[in-house]
Image (spheres, rainbow, N blue to C red):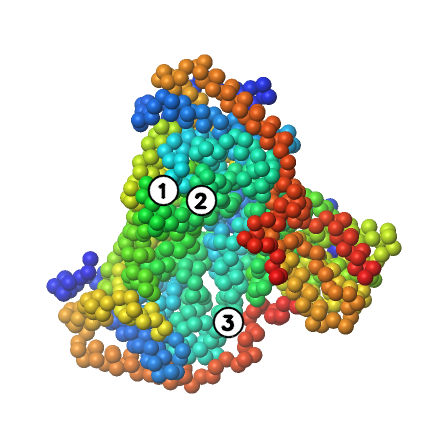
């Protein structure tokens, strides 16, 4: 099922997630010369996933800026650019390296508009690849959304499909406030789809129902949306009807989509790659318990990573940490039959 | 690509051209000064360099064969790492390296078997297969645990040095290493400043190989002589030819002695070069010319040092060949042994989160 | 480098007119007066907090004189009352901030002294030391990127801030890209209770400039004309494409860090009194009198005028209302604030 309807006269191109990021950034750079890209290895190297390959040749080193190794100032300098009228797109090479920039994101970018009563604003995009399943070990696999989604003033999106990548990245670039744009690195080349041509925007804060169902609501985002969809389709063959929602946007988050679905299916499973304790599933569970308790026929469940610091480099450790479609199917089956 | 390695043996360039117009500090041009090292010690340094090169090539091979997912490169760093390791005092000093320090790790006592266990992510590895290759930790060797996050290890090294001073453990020092890229990090700055304020027993060794993945020195800093930053912190700064293991030994030794005897920290900058891409996941053809790399290859520290040792009569060419064969045999034996070991079990994911249990809800 | 009284007669004014010199002096008096007023109001229980800047008057007035209103950008820190006044903020705006009134630029949200004024070119900042420096560098990048010659960013900080990683990262980036950026370090020897000797092993901060590949110099921050000359030189260099520099002014922090600090717990009365001999306000008054720029009567009238202005601003600001509770919810984002939508 397409995530963005390709109708009528709109043509589309098949591409994967990394190509969708690249194409969207390219159009943004072409259409607005206030847009600059700032990060490590984005110039001649073209980004370590080749997202900005050849950009420096076309747009020049003043617009495609290779920085020293200094994450706090990659974000901080971008904040300053934004305060002074540019539209910077900052890149943190791997989400695992974002921690030195934590204050600039949470204490500065998120608060600029608020503390200056709107006189100064921070229209900034911070892009970073996150997530595991690529033998990335402790420093190339983490999920960081739970550390940031707590923060008012910040927006966070985590699309899973190429069409959503383009629409949400455009929305992030247009947004007058700071947006953390999370790209699951395993989906870069793994996930392909139709992407409408031309400029379009998907509003931040809107989830997408990928598959309708009547017996269980499954909410997910990132790589796991794809695994959850696989599992739900498998259950379809067993006569079990599971609805799968792709959050797409983590802050703000789509309450209506979740509540409408839970009121219909009366059971909720949240699946995410990040650790369980304090993860996104915790907030969703609390909200549903507060607002739809009497619509539930079973306890809310969360299928997440165990609360250990990271997935290990060795394959058995990575696999133990991550959840597979089979594991997801097993939990879904249990819940439908509860 | 690394120097061509076949299963039968490794081929090193057997001669070194003298190029007088080479812009780098030519190792062959400097006089042969062993700085007090015996012939045996010089050969040991050379052996460390050969082991480093061989094991690194082995990592790339295994990756190309699809046996391991990843390997990182350190070709070009052999001299600085072997020299620094020779100055390091086992059982007394502490090493806080970064992920490109294969040679230093070997030089202070890590074995090829331990290296291969890490490449293969086996349970018997120091981190039980949790960490990326080359992220060793060994309390016994004085080798501190590190992450992949650049410069994050510097404050740790400074803290360890503070502990040494606090406990009045004279005669001990911390050697912390990093590349040119790390010197742009805020934590690099904060670490040098603190070490200087407290006159800590620590040596900051910069292995300036001119590239941080694709970022050349000119985009990393407007001051290419990184040792000149030392004065701003109030500590001595020293520059050394990073392609000459004996000069590196001397520079690091002097700095470590200063540290061990209460003289405080030093910033040592060793100018070397990174011949290969950053890791097996990088392709340096996208950002630098083959001509530049080939030109710098003329100063390849491994064949250069071999040639100098032979010319100085420390080693015969037959002995050099025998040494290389023996290193290769050791590498092969370590590879086979490590490959045969078991992976960690899934249950190993849950150990060592805290001292007691891992669950957050109690 | 401190000028002695005998040197006052060889008076170098670096092209400043009498009117400009009087303007500098007025700024210094106003800074001191407003500074005191904040402390007074706190002791009277009218405001919960005030931050002092006594000792920085010459440095800030001299720097402000070199700043070009309407063209340059200021990225200050929370001890820059004099600089804020010097680039055009009024005592009324200062008092609105001290009283946390709704009409304050920040709607009463920020601590006092955390000024922000788009009109004056004063970038919004937080209390986090050095966090504003990458912002200042980014703004300088924007100026250069848009080809806006004749404009520069003047960023300031204290000695303590120079230990921060983000100070280092900012200097490095500015130098690589030869940005129109000036790093003005106001070295007052104390970071709350941390003396310079515990902050760094090399007490001359300007000497770090070579490590970044940019020029650096030191000047006498107790002398507003010395300051003006040094900051002007640096700003002229930056505005004309000559790149960034570090200029370090020596001064002294006479008071505690803020109304919540007691400096007698960490330094001696004697040290403070010894440095009072260099107090820039009476020293510059003396220079102006000695060189006929002002008479005693002029000075008395000026002091009275500054006090009057301060009193009027205090009364006007105090009479203004606090922000409404509903104001808490505005300016989280451009649109709605709720996270669940």
Q: Residues within 10 Å of mark 1 (few under 14, many from 20)?
A: many
Identify the residue shown where x is 77% and y is 72%.
A294
Identify the residue shown where x is 36% and y is 61%.
C156
* Quarter placement of the C terminus of chain B: bottom right
Q: Quadrant of residue C298?
A: bottom left
Visible residue check, residue C91: yes
Q: Position of residue C30 (x, y in %)?
A: 30, 75
Q: Which mark is residue A117?
A: 3
Q: Chain of mark 1?
A: B
Residues marked 1 and 3, same chain = no
Residues marked 2 and 3, same chain = no
Q: Nearer the viewer, mark 2 or mark 3?
A: 2
N-terminal of the two: label 1 or label 2? Answer: 1
Q: Position of residue A12 (x, y in %)?
A: 74, 49
Q: Secondary structure at mark 2?
A: helix
Q: Is residue B127 left or right of residue C84?
A: right
**Residue at mark 1 to residue at mark 2: CA–CA distance:** 21 Å
Q: Chain of mark 3?
A: A
Q: Secondary structure at mark 1?
A: loop
Give the residue furthest to the left. Answer: C6
Q: Quadrant of residue A218?
A: bottom right
* Quarter placement of the N terminus of chain B: top right
Q: Which mark is residue B182?
A: 2
Q: Is residue A74 left or right of residue A173?
A: left
Q: Which mark is residue B173?
A: 1
Q: Position of residue C213 (x, y in %)?
A: 35, 45
Q: Chain of mark 2?
A: B
Q: Secondary structure at mark 3?
A: loop
Identify the residue shown where x is 32% and y is 41%.
B171
Question: Eyeballing the image, is C261 above or below B68?
Answer: below
């Amino acid at each position: 099922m397409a995530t963005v309807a390709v109708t009528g006269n709109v043509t589309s191109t098949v591409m994967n997630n990394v190509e969708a990021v690249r194409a969207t950034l390219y159009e943004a750079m072409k259409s607005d010369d206030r847009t600059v890209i700032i990060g490590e290895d984005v110039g001649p190297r073209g980004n370590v996933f080749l997202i900005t390959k050849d950009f420096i040749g076309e747009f020049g080193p003043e617009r495609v800026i290779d920085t020293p190794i200094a994450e706090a100032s990659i974000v901080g300098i971008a904040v300053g650019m934004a305060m002074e009228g540019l539209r910077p797109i900052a890149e943190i090479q791997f989400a695992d390296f974002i921690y030195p920039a934590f204050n600039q994101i949470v204490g500065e970018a998120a608060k600029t508009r608020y503390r200056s009563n709107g006189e100064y604003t921070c229209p900034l995009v911070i892009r970073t690849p996150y997530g595991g399943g690529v033998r990335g070990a402790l420093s190339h696999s983490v999920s960081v959304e739970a550390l940031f989604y707590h923060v008012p003033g910040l927006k966070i999106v985590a699309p899973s499909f190429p069409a959503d990548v383009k629409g949400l990245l455009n929305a992030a670039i247009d947004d007058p406030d700071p947006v953390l744009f999370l790209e699951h690195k395993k989906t870069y080349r793994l996930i392909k789809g139709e992407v409408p041509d031309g400029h379009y925007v998907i509003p931040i804060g809107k989830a997408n129902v990928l598959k309708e169902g009547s017996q269980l609501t499954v909410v997910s985002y990132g790589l796991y949306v794809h695994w959850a969809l696989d599992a739900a389709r498998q259950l379809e063959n067993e006569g079990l009807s599971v609805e799968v929602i792709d959050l797409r946007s983590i802050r703000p988050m789509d309450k209506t989509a979740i509540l409408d679905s839970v009121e219909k299916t009366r059971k909720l499973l949240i699946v995410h790659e990040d650790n369980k304790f304090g993860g996104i599933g915790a907030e969703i569970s609390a909200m549903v318990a507060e607002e739809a308790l009497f619509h539930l026929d079973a306890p809310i469940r969360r299928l997440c990573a165990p609360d250990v610091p990271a997935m290990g480099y060795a394959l058995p450790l990575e696999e133990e940490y991550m959840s597979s479609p089979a594991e997801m199917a097993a939990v879904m089956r249990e819940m439908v039959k509860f | 690509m690394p120097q061509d390695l076949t299963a039968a043996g490794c081929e090193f360039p057997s001669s070194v051209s003298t190029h007088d117009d080479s812009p780098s500090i030519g190792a062959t041009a400097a006089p042969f000064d062993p700085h007090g090292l015996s012939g045996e010690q010089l050969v040991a340094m050379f052996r460390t360099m050969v082991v480093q090169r061989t094991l690194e090539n082995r990592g790339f091979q295994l990756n190309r064969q699809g046996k391991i997912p990843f390997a990182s490169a350190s070709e070009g760093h052999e001299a600085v790492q072997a020299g620094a390791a020779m100055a390091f005092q086992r059982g007394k000093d502490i090493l806080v390296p970064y992920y490109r320090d294969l040679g230093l790790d070997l030089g202070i006592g890590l074995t090829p078997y331990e290296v291969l266990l890490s490449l293969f992510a086996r349970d018997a590895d120091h981190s039980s297969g949790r960490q990326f290759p080359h992220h060793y930790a060994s309390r016994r060797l004085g080798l501190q645990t590190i992450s992949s996050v650049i410069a994050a290890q510097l404050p740790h090294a400074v803290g360890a040095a503070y502990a040494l001073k606090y406990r009045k453990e004279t005669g001990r020092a911390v050697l912390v290493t990093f590349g040119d890229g790390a010197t742009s990090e805020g934590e690099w700055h904060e670490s040098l400043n603190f070490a200087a304020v407290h006159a800590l027993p620590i040596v900051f060794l910069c292995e300036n190989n001119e590239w941080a993945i694709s970022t050349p020195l000119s985009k990393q800093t407007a001051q290419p002589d990184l040792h000149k930053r030392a004065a701003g912190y109030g500590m001595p700064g020293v520059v050394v030819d990073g392609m000459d293991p004996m000069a590196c030994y001397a520079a690091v030794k002097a700095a470590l002695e200063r540290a061990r005897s209460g003289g405080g920290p030093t910033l040592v900058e060793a100018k070397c070069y990174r011949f290969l891409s950053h890791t097996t996941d990088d392709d340096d053809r996208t950002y630098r010319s083959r001509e530049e790399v080939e030109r710098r290859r003329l100063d390849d520290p491994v064949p250069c040092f071999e040639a100098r040792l032979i010319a100085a009569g420390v080693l015969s060419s037959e002995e050099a060949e025998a040494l290389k064969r023996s290193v290769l045999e050791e590498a092969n034996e370590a590879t086979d042994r490590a490959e045969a070991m078991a992976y960690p079990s899934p249950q190993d994911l849950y150990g060592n989160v805290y001292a007691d249990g891992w669950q957050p809800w109690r | 480098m401190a000028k002695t009284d005998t040197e006052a007669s060889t008076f170098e004014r670096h092209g400043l007119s009498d009117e400009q010199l009087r303007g500098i002096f007025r700024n210094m008096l106003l800074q001191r007066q407003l500074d005191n007023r904040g402390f007074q109001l706190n002791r009277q229980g009218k405001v919960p907090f005030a931050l002092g800047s006594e000792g920085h008057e010459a440095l800030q007035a001299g720097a402000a004189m070199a700043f070009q209103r309407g063209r340059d950008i200021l990225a200050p820190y929370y001890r820059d009352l004099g600089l804020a006044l010097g680039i055009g903020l009024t005592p009324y705006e200062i008092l609105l901030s001290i009283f946390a009134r709704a009409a304050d630029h920040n709607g009463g949200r920020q601590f006092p002294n955390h000024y922000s004024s788009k009109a004056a070119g004063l970038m919004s900042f937080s209390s986090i030391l050095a966090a504003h420096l990458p912002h200042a560098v980014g703004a300088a990048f924007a100026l250069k990127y848009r080809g806006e010659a004749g404009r520069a960013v003047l960023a300031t900080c204290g000695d303590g801030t120079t230990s921060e990683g983000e100070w280092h990262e900012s200097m490095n980036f500015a130098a690589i890209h030869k940005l129109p950026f000036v790093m003005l370090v106001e070295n007052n020897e104390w970071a709350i209770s941390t003396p310079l000797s515990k902050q760094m092993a090399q007490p001359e901060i300007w000497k770090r400039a070579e490590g970044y590949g940019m020029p650096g110099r030191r000047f006498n921050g107790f002398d507003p004309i010395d300051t003006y000359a040094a900051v002007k030189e640096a700003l002229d260099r930056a505005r004309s494409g000559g790149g960034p520099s570090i200029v370090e002014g020596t001064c002294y922090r006479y008071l505690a860090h803020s109304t919540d600090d007691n400096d007698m717990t960490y330094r001696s009365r004697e040290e403070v009194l010894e440095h009072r001999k260099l107090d820039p306000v009476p020293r510059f008054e003396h220079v102006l009198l000695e060189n006929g720029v002002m008479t005693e009567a002029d000075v008395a009238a000026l002091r009275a005028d500054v006090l009057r202005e301060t009193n009027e601003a205090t009364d006007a600001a105090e009479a203004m209302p606090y922000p409404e509770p509903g104001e808490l919810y505005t300016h989280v984002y451009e649109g709605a604030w709720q996270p669940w939508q």
